[in-house]
């Protein structure tokens, strides 16, 4: 390969992580790779070819017609490689085939539902291998970076693609430069650069700095009128002309702020502009009086999940109003009211909070891009859609949904009724399946008004008594639909398959339920 034709570094790294996932999946019927950013057949197929040379028996379906050339260059023969999902299904259903079937796609293909029993290899799985690699890579210089990678690896507000970018930026650095750049390059994680970020090396200190930094970044993203006035006062109060000019330049960058990576603003600059003072360290005990106990630490911040957990662990005899069931119902109602006030076209995170009887405030962040997308695609008689969107990973595609996504087809009740009526007309099992679905749909409609709260605080909604009573019927009804589906489709007469033009969908469902 010429240098210009080599895969990007991100693609090479992702292909190595994918090879680790494939190796670990041996013994499974197959591996389904999708929604993974930076996929490139020029990088992926040579890694899989190395596994084959190490006696890992594979069948590879890379669902991209251009992948044939890369397979040939990697030395993968045509009898174990394809770009067609149909051939992957043939391998999957071949008795006695012990090879691991690897299916790789950069989009949702119509027939991938037949491969849902394959082990998934998406960003959620690959980030574990990336974090393990980072911990080993950065463990020698100091202890703080491995601890930091464990924290961000489990943080669902940081995308896999951002972690890849951050790792590659630090990979070739060493010593003091590595530590310094690890603090300055956190803008790649949606945070603000902070040279002092790793001054406190304990896990508690790192988590506190992460939470504080993210709070400031969210305030800059939303940039309320109140914060705008604070910034104006901070600029007037700055006495050094050069510093004031630099802050004004950073403020100009703020007008198009989306993520920390688009700013040259540091966390310290942001604190000055927003008039946020650093939390002072706790005072030392009085001298000469060692028996005096230090003041108790401040209570940990409370979020919606921890509030729900406290209720679940609550003793019946406990009279703590903050964890009482009525408090949870009130919290859900208050959260719902705040969600209705959020603009349905925004994609910026929004802060929400609920006050408990004791005065403690429960804070949360609304991923408005997710909530607004779900509200558009899910509703009464609407069960999602097939969407074409651009982006390297699922987070990017969701963020760009309102601007660039193309809804190819909505999944609606009328489409489902066609099949339910066909089944019900020819067999008692089909009629039972239709009735079970009707019951499920009715219980689902009763829960839909709380869809926004479910997106933001699912455990809280599941725990609060009022909404818990709505969720349980949905789960039970859905379980009955699944049981009826498999029984009904297995026993339905084969004439049903010929009743409708879209016979391949029904026949496909029949095979999916058939015991292997």
Image: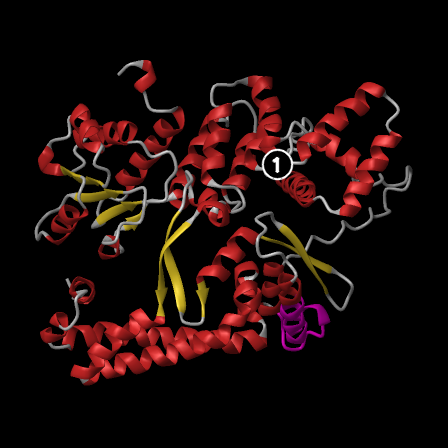
Q: Quadrant of the C terminus?
A: bottom left
- For residue 287, what is the image quadrant? top right
For residue 185, say whether it is visible: yes
Residue stretch in magenta: 314-334
The image shows residue 17, relative to residue 98, as above or below, that is above
The stretch drawn in magenta includes residue 281? no
Q: Is residue 348 left or right of residue 12?
A: right
**Residue 476 location in percent, x, y?**
39, 76
The image shows residue 356, relative to residue 45, as above or below, that is below
Tell me the residue that label 1 is attached to: 191
For residue 275, say whether it is visible: no
- Callout 1: few (<14), some (14-19), or many (20+) C-alpha neighbours within 10 Å? many
**Depth check: 34 or 495 in front?**
495
What main secondary structure does the magenta stretch of the protein show? helix
Identify the residue at the far top of this view: 2
Q: Is residue 91 left or right of residue 272?
A: left
Helix, strand or loop at disc 1?
loop
The stretch drawn in magenta includes residue 328? yes
Residue shown at the point (42%, 79%) measured from the top left: 442
**Depth check: 154 or 344 in front?**
344
**Residue 402 location in percent, x, y?**
50, 50
**Residue 487 location in percent, x, y?**
21, 75
**Residue 96 location in percent, x, y?**
8, 50
Residue shown at the point (73%, 34%) measured from the top left: 270
The image shows residue 217, relative to residue 366, as above or below, that is above
């Amino acid at each position: 390969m010429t240098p210009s034709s080599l895969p990007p570094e991100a693609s090479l790294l992702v292909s190595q992580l994918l090879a680790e996932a494939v190796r670990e999946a041996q013994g499974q019927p197959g591996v389904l790779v999708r929604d993974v950013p930076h996929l490139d057949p020029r990088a992926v197929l040579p890694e899989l070819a190395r596994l084959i040379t190490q006696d890992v028996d594979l069948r590879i379906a890379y669902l991209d017609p251009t992948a044939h050339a890369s397979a040939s260059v990697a030395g993968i023969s045509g009898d174990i490689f394809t770009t067609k999902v149909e051939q992957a299904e043939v391998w999957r259903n071949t008795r006695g085939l012990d090879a691991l079937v690897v299916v790789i796609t950069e989009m949702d293909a119509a027939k991938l539902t037949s491969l849902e029993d394959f082990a998934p290899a998406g960003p959620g799985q690959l980030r574990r291998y990336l974090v393990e690699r980072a911990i080993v890579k950065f463990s020698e210089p100091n202890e703080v970076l491995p601890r930091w990678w464990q924290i961000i690896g489990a943080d669902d507000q940081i995308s896999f693609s951002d972690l890849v970018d951050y790792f590659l930026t630090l990979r070739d650095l060493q010593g003091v430069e590595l530590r310094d750049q690890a603090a300055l390059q956190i803008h790649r994680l949606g945070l603000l650069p902070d040279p002092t970020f790793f001054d406190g090396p304990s896990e508690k200190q790192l988590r506190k700095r992460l939470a504080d930094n993210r709070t400031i970044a969210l305030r800059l993203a939303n940039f309320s009128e109140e914060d705008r006035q604070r910034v104006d006062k901070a600029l007037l109060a700055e006495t050094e002309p050069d510093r004031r000019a630099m802050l004004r330049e950073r403020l100009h960058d703020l007008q198009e702020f989306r993520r920390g990576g688009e700013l040259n603003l540091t966390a310290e600059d942001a604190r000055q502009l927003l008039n946020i003072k650093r939390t002072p360290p706790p005072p030392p005990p009085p001298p000469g009086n060692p028996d005096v106990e230090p003041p108790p630490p401040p209570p940990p911040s409370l979020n919606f999940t921890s509030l729900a957990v406290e209720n679940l662990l609550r003793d019946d005899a406990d009279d703590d109003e903050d964890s009482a069931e009525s408090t949870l119902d009130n919290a859900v109602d208050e959260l719902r009211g705040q969600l209705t006030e959020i603009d349905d076209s925004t994609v910026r995170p929004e802060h929400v909070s609920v006050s408990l009887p004791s005065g403690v405030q429960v804070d949360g962040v609304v991923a408005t891009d997710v909530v607004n997308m779900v509200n558009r695609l899910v509703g009464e008689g609407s069960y999602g859609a097939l969407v074409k969107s651009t982006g390297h990973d699922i987070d990017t595609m969701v963020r760009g949904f309102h601007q660039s996504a193309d809804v190819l087809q909505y999944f609606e009740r009328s489409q489902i009724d066609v099949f339910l009526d066909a089944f019900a007309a020819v067999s008692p099992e089909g009629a039972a399946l239709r009735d079970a679905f009707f019951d499920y749909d009715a219980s689902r409609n009763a829960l839909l008004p709380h869809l926004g709260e479910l997106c933001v605080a699912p455990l809280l909604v599941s725990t609060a008594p009022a909404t818990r009573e709505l969720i349980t019927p949905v789960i039970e009804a859905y379980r009955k639909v699944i049981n009826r589906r498999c029984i009904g489709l297995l026993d339905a007469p084969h004439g049903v398959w010929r009743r409708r033009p879209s016979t391949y969908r029904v026949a496909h469902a029949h095979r999916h339920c058939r015991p292997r």
